[in-house]
Amino acid sequence: MRSIRPWLVAPGTLFALSLFFLSPTNGPQRAAADDKAETSKAAADKKLSMVQRNREETAPGSGKYRVVERQVDWDPAHTAIIVCDMWNQHWCQGATARVAEMAPRMNDVLNAARQAGVLIIHCPSDTMKFYQDAPQRKIAQQAPKVELKKMPANWCPQSDGKEPPLPFDNSKDRCDCSPQCAHGNPWRRQIDTLEIADSDAITDNDEAFYLMRDRNIQNVIVLGVHTNMCVLGRPFSIRRMCAQGQNVVLVRDLTDCMHDSLSPPLGLDHFRATDLVIEHIEKYWCPTITSPDLLAGAPFSFKEDKRPSVVMVIGEDEYETAATLPPFADEELTSRGLRVTTIHASKDDLQDFRGLEALKNADLMLVSVRRRTPKTAQLAAIRDFVASGKPVVGIRTASHAFSLRDDKEPPADHAAWPEFDAQVLGGHYTGHHGKNGDGGASTYVQSLAAAKDHPILANVDDKEFGAQSWLYKTNPLAKSATPLMIGRAEGRDTNEPVAWTNKTETGNRVFYTSLGSPPDFELPAFRRLLTNGIFWALDKPFPADTAASK
Ligand SMILES: [Zn+2]
């Protein structure tokens, strides 16, 4: 098992730091330089701290990609946001409605970013006439022209050699409304929900890059519509900006695709279609982020997006679940029709789980946290979720998620929940049986005969298998728990439950497994067990595998 710890690699951090340290500190312009250093320090304090998701080829030329999430810091003073084609009206009524639905959250994000020092560039294509006298239009027009690396001027088409065709065909330019909408060009301006401040710029062409070059901006955040069309192809957007060597990210919860449900693959859900384009972008063009990277609150989702929502709360350093859970979610859950949000403890403050507001709209919480005491409001969000009676899944260190060793008191404004194991998971964690010294399996796991018909064990090999995770001491389970699998420690005459369900006083359907080390994620039995556990907790049947084929 290769070790993957993307948290330790944050290229953007180096970039931000190098900007800071490049400030001159002596010479005739000493005073001005000091001012600059102050400004630079203030900017560094206000850094944009984001979780960038990418898809990286597992081996060069293999064509197999795996999701990687990294915490990266960007300096807002060197960052611009491109607002792509958020028109007041589209020929497709569905598209027009979704733009209107998304615009309030987008406006809040733009306000926050602008306050942090990010340049906002509004790019409603073909509507420059409406803005011809606006001072923000002049800001873009006055940027000195610079040479652009080769690419067609007005539209950057699919780039042969760099990317395959998009995951679905929309060349006929049709929508998936029923009946389909009639074509036209009804857009006249940007939707007025999005405020345009004095410091913003407006353009729909190469001026966007001229302006970035003029302001020493290398980082570009793209949001808007449509993911499979203008977001990729417009001269101010992803393909062009990547070709100029900019660092580009797409905000994946503030975009929407144009999709025709009558084109193959037939029956593809509209929001899953957007996801497929986002996957394409992550493979071939640039990483993506979500709006909570820029502003507190839950990621945006459309009300028509009915997919069950799973929120994974990740904060532990022992078992690398920050690296294993995102690709697991992508390969086993998203592909089977669930919508997954990952919440990572901040690399700068291990007790800070930014974005936990997502739990408010979640259908299931998965916990992979070890000995953290979140901020009081964040732990309250976790308690509220449990109190709501919704499903909870825990893996490995979830049994000692929210308590410090020896029940030490949490710091001020932080809270602990030492009874989470007993009250929610139904377990009784008291340590572990140690590691197999010779590097082989530490635990041998087997399904219990009494549980063989349980849906969580469907298609999980009922033969004993070896796992690297050393055996946790979990006995005795709560009376409300039902054990499914048992483990014995290598070289010891001891058994402990390693997978069980629990029914809490608040009615939550709970699944827990003490497995979850990085090599376990390579075991088909573990992957199926965890996937089954999540679908069981959601009270949903496991979907036919054809739905997951990708
Ligand atoms: Zn339509």
Image (cartoon, rainbow, N blue to C red):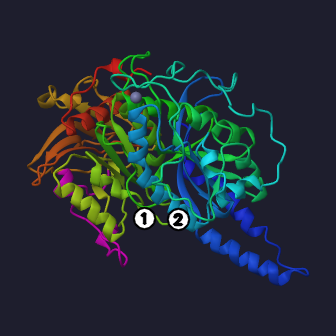
* Left or right placement of residue 224 versus residue 11 in this view: left
Magenta residues, start to end: 404-432
Query: SS class of the residue under badge 2?
Result: loop
Asked if 225 appears above or below 550 in the picture, the reply is below
Q: Give, as a three-letter code, the residue at label 1.
A: Asp
Q: Quadrant of ligand 1?
A: top left
Position in image of residue 412 (x %, y %): 36, 79
Real-space CA distance between mark 1 and mark 2, rounded to the nearest whole angstrom:
8 Å
- Residue 249 sits above or below residue 297 on the image: above
Q: Position of residue 96 (x, y in %)?
A: 42, 39
Q: For the stretch drawn in magenta, what is the main secondary structure?
A: loop
Near-viewer residue (375 or 30): 30
Residue 497's spot in the image, x, y percent?
21, 42
Whether the magenta-drawn stretch holds residue 405 is answered as: yes
What is the count of numbered marks? 2
Q: Are marks 1 and 2 in contact (CB under 8 Å)?
A: yes
Is 118 situated above or below 406?
above
Instruction: Name the quarter where the C terminus is drawn.
Output: top left
Q: Is residue 206 visible?
A: yes
The quarter holding residue 49 reads bottom right
Q: Which mark is residue 348?
A: 2
Q: Residue furthest bottom?
A: 31
> Foreground residue, 283 or 64?
283
Was residue 64 drawn as part of the magenta stretch in this picture?
Answer: no
Q: Position of residue 282 (x, y in %)?
A: 56, 36
Name the amino acid type tagged 2: Asp
Q: Is residue 288 left or right of residue 153?
A: left
SS of the residue at dot 1? loop
- What residue sits 75% from the left and 42% below the top? 244
Residue at image mark 1: 352
Residue 381, by quadrant, is: bottom left
